[in-house]
Image (cartoon, coloured by chain):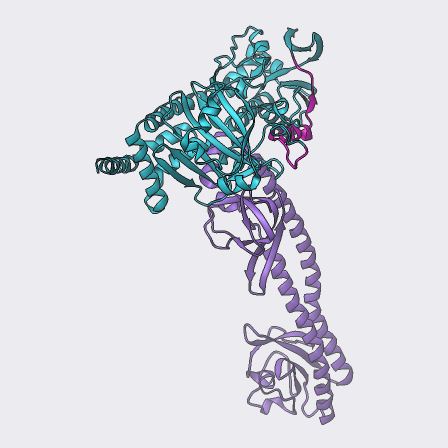
Chain colours: A purple, B cyan
Amino acid sequence: MREGELGKTYNDGEVIFKEGEKGEVMYVIQAGKVRIKRDSTSGELTLGVLETGEIFGEMALFDRLPRSATVVALGGARILSVDRKKLFPTISRDPTLLFKILETMSQRIRKLDDEIGKLNKRRSELRIVCSNIEKTCDTILQEARRIIVADSGSVMLLDEKEGYLSIKAAFGLKSDTKIRLKIGEGIAGDVLKTGRAELIDNVLTDLRFLPGTTKVTSMLCAPIGCEGRNFGVINMSYASENVFSANDLKLIRALAVYASIAIQNEQNFFNLKNATDDLLRRATLPDAP
Amino acid sequence: MKRSLDSDQYTLQDGANIAVVGGGPTGSFFSIFALKMAKMIGREITVTIFEPKDFTKDGPGGCNRCGGIISELLVQTLAVEGINLPDTVVRKGINSYRLHTNQGSVFIATPSLEKTIATVYRGGGPKGTLGQDMESFDHFLLNQAIHEGAVHKTFRVDRIDFRNGRPLLFSKNVEIMQADLVVGAFGVNSSSGKIFEGLGFGYREPSNVTAAIAEISMDEDVVVGRFGNSIQLFLLPDKGIKFGAMIPKGPYVTLCILGTDVGARTVDDFVSKPVVRAVLPESVPYRIACRCLPKMNVGAPKKPFTNRVVLCGDAGSTRLFKDGLGAAYIMGKAAAKTAVFEGVGAHNFKRNYLPVYNGIVFDNYFGRFLYFVIDRYRKTTILTKAMLKVVEKEQRDPKNGKILSSILWDMFTGNERYKNVFLKSVKIKMHIDMWEGLIKSLIGENR
C-alpha cells in the first residue's frame, strides 16, 4: 500500500479493536479486507468479512455498549476512523448524514433476516433428527420384543446434566413413562452404575426394586454404553416370576451392544446439531458490529 | 391558500429539470445529493451540469485554482456518505503540521497519527503531469455525479432569462434548456457571476481577496524526505500576508499564500525568506512549475436565491480562508435537500437553505476575530515565542491537555467551525499556560 494514502494501515492479523472494548469511533475500509470474529466455547468464530468501502463498528457509537466482536485486518487493510465527537455534531446539523448508515444497517438487518430464515429451516431439520433418538430407542425395543417375550419394556437414557434416567421408549400396559431414576437408584439405576446386565426372577424380593404403576415380577436389565461409559439401560419385564432364561440375558446383552452403537451415533449427531445450532445462533446475533 | 398554491408550484415534480451552472465540487455535491434524495422519495428528476472545463487537463486549463486540502472532517464525512476518495485522487495523506515562525518551529500531529487529511489536485495537475497515475478531485466528483445519473454538458451558459416564470438558459445565444431550478455553483474566478447579477433579484458577486498559489517541482524522494506526511505552515510577521502553507503532493509541493497584499512577486519573495528556504532543499534543484493568483471569497452575497434560482459554494457563502471544499459539501447538500424535499421557491430557500448559509456567514465572524488574534501573535515576537513554548509543552506532555495545539490544528486544517475554535480559546487553562509561556519567554529574553 502507498505511504501517502488516507487512514491507518494494519498488517495481516493486526487487531483494529477487541470484543468488550469501549467504542469511540467507527471505521470505513479504504483498502483491503477485515475479519470480524468472536471467541466462543467451540473456539474462534468468524462472523463475517468486510471489504473496501464498507463501514464497521458503528453500533457501539449508537448503543454505547462495548464492542460485540473483535475486528482484525485480513491480509493487510487501510482503515479510516470516524470519531464520535466529530460525527454526532455533524449529524445534529445534518441528519441526512444518517441515510447512508441507515442504509448499511438495513442491509445488515435484511442479511440477518435471511440467515435467521435459513437457521429456522435448519432447526426444523434438526428437530426431526432430535426426534430420531426416541425413534431409535423405539426400534431397539421393538427388536428386543421380537427376540424376547415380555409384557412390558423400556429403554431409559441418562440425562447427563440432570443425572437421572428417563424413559425414551416403552411398551406394555400402564407403562409409567414419567419415571425418573437417579444413578444407582432402583434396579435400572444400579445396572447403569455397575454396568452389569442382570436377570431377576422376582423383583419383589430385590431391595433395590422401586414399585411403579406397572406390575413387574420378572425382569431383564442390561446397560447401554460404550468405552466404559454407560448412558442408558434396556429393561424387559413380565408380570409373572421366573419367566426369563439365561439365554434371554445373553440376547439382551448382545442387543444392548448394538443399541449402544445406534444411540451413541444419534447422540453424537444430536451434539453436533447443538454445536451447529450454537454457531448459527452466534453468527446471526443482531449485535454484530 | 396562497402558500399551498405556491408550494405546489415550486415543488419539484416527476420530470423536473435542474440546471447546474458549474461542475466543480459544489455543483457535483448538489447533483449527487439531489439525485440520491429524489430516488429516496421516488421522484424522477433530471440534473444537467454545465461545465466547459476539462478537469483531466494538466496545467491551468483544467485547474480550479485552490490549495487542494480536504479537511479531516470532510474526509470522514464523505466516507460516511459512501464517497471514499480513491488512491489515484489523494496525492498525499496528511497526519501532521509543522508550524514555522521567525522564532522557531513546532510539530503538531493528530493524536492517532492517522492520515486523515487529503491533499488533492483540482485539475489534472501541474503542466506536464498528464498521463501519470492520478485523477483530479473535481473530475472524480463530477464522475460520481454522472454515476448517480447527472448529465454533463460542456456548454458555457452565458445568459439566463425567465419565460413563464421558469429560467431559460442560453449558450452563444442559443436556447439550451428551460429549467425548474438553476443552481449557480461557479467559483469566484468564473465570469458566471455576472449572469446571475443580471437576473435582477439582488445577487452581487462575493467580495474577494487575491491568493498566490504555486507548484514547486522537485524529486518525489525529496518531497517524501523533507515533508513526509506533514503540511508546513508559516506564520511570519510580514505585512499583508496572513499565512503561507506548503502542501506535499507527490513530486510537487503546492505553496499557498493568503493575505491582503498578494501580487505577482509574492511567491518569489516568500520562498526567498530564510525560514521558508530552510524548509526547501538546499543541494537539490527545485523549480516553480506553475503559479496563479486566484481570487478567494471573503464576503458572502446577501441575496443568494430567488424563485427557481439558488447560488451556493464559492458563489455564495464559504468558509473564511479554509475548507472551501467543506463549505461546498455543506452548501451543495443544503441546496439539494431544500430543492428535493421542500421546493424551489424563494420561501423554501429562505426557510431551509438560508439558515445553513447564514450559519457559515456567522461562523466567519469568529474566524475573522481568530485571525485577528493570530495576526497579533505572529507580529509580536514575545507572543510568538510564548505560543511556541506552550505548543512544545503540550506536544511533549499531552496528559496536561493540548488546547493551543488543538486550536492551531483546527484553525489551519479547517477541521472545526471557527465558533468552536473560539470557545476552546476562552478556556482558562490555555490562558494560564500562555501566561506561563509569556513569563518564560520574557525571562529568556532578559538573560
Which residue is rendered at x = 54% and y = 43% of the image?
A7
Identify the residue at image location x=74%, y=92%: A247
Q: In front here: B434 or A74?
A: B434
State the image coordinates of residue B175 (x, y, percent, origin top left): 71, 9
Left or right of B206 in this view: A30: right
Q: Residue at x 57, y 74 (%)?
A: A160
Compared with A275, B145 (above or below) is above
Q: Nearer the viewer, residue B428 or B263?
A: B263
**B82 is higher (above) or lower (below) than B339:** below
* Residue B140 shown in magenta: yes
Q: Quadrant of residue A227?
A: bottom right
In the image, residue A251 lies in the stretch drawn in magenta:
no
| Tally of marks | 0
Q: What span is colored magenta in the figure?
A: B131-157
Percent of width and height locating residue B183: 60, 18
- Residue found 74% across the figure and 88% down from its top: A251
